[in-house]
Image (cartoon, rainbow, N blue to C red):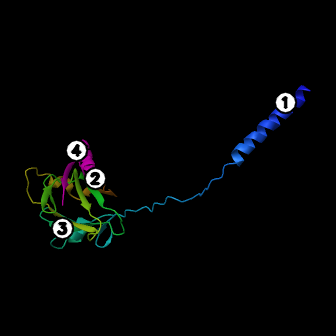
């Protein structure tokens, strides 16, 4: 008998609940959508003579003909490196780091007409979206016959080596400052070129 009362009680409760919710009418409309974000991209390359930069033989850049493809004290020359952000949909900040491992003490370098020490130097710049998307940097070099430190004899029949590393990044509001601060922390001489 008790089970019958329980069944009747539960059935009554379920009927009341169904009546309560069934007697209210309302309109309902559901809308679905999707959030979409198309991402941009950056493209960055450094070119030498219209090809991706891998190396520059200073003998190919001399003002006069290099004898047997070698450079010697008294020689000088210049070449250009082109930072290229063609294809980017953003501003691109970049750094070009020069680290000389084996360079005569009296060898002189200029980057964009500013005298620099390519043994430990970083060039920092930015390419704005919508501009030509390239920036050209001229590197001039000169190996005088004599200098304050005359170590030319130490470089007879040797290789002069300057390692170069170029990095392009999306240029956020504070990225150039971040790159400059990193150069200072890494104890690298740096120049920001506009």
| Residue on which disc 4 sits | 184
Please indicate, yes or no, whether residue 151 appears anywhere in the rendered image: yes
- Determine which quarter of the picture holds residue 171: bottom left
Which of label 2 and label 1 is nearer to you?
Answer: 1
Other-residue count near label 4 (Cα within 10 Å), few / some / many at <14 / 14–19 / ≥20: few
- Determine which quarter of the picture holds residue 83: bottom left
Q: CA distance from mark 3 to mark 1?
A: 100 Å
Indicate the secondary structure of the residue bearing disc 4: helix
In the image, residue 2 above or below residue 110: above
Other-residue count near label 3 (Cα within 10 Å), few / some / many at <14 / 14–19 / ≥20: some
For image coordinates 43% across by 61% down, the residue present is 39
Whole-percent x and y of residue 123? 22, 56
Quadrant location, the N terminus: top right
Furthest residue in direction right, as rendered: 1
Indicate the secondary structure of the residue bearing disc 2: loop
Which of label 1 and label 4 is nearer to you?
Answer: 1
Q: Which mark is residue 78?
A: 3
The numbered mark, 1 or 4, whose residue comes first in the sequence reads 1
């Amino acid at each position: 008998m008790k089970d019958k009362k329980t069944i009747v009680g539960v059935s009554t409760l379920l009927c009341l609940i169904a009546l309560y919710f069934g007697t209210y009418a309302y309109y309902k409309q559901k809308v679905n959508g999707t959030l979409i974000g198309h991402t941009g991209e950056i493209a960055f390359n450094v070119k030498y003579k219209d090809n991706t930069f891998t190396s520059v033989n200073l003998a190919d850049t001399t003002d006069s003909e290099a004898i047997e493809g070698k450079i010697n004290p008294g020689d000088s020359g210049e070449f250009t490196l082109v930072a290229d952000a063609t294809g980017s949909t953003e501003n691109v900040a970049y750094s070009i780091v020069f680290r000389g491992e084996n360079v005569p003490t009296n060898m002189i370098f200029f980057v964009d007409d500013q005298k620099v020490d390519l043994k430990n130097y970083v060039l920092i710049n930015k390419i704005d979206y919508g501009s030509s998307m390239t920036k050209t940097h001229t590197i001039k070099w000169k190996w005088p016959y004599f200098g304050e430190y005359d170590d030319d004899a130490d470089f007879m029949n040797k290789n002069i080596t300057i390692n170069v590393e170029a990095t392009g990044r999306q240029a956020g509001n504070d990225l150039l400052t971040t790159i400059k601060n990193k150069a200072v922390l890494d104890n690298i001489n740096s120049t920001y070129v506009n």
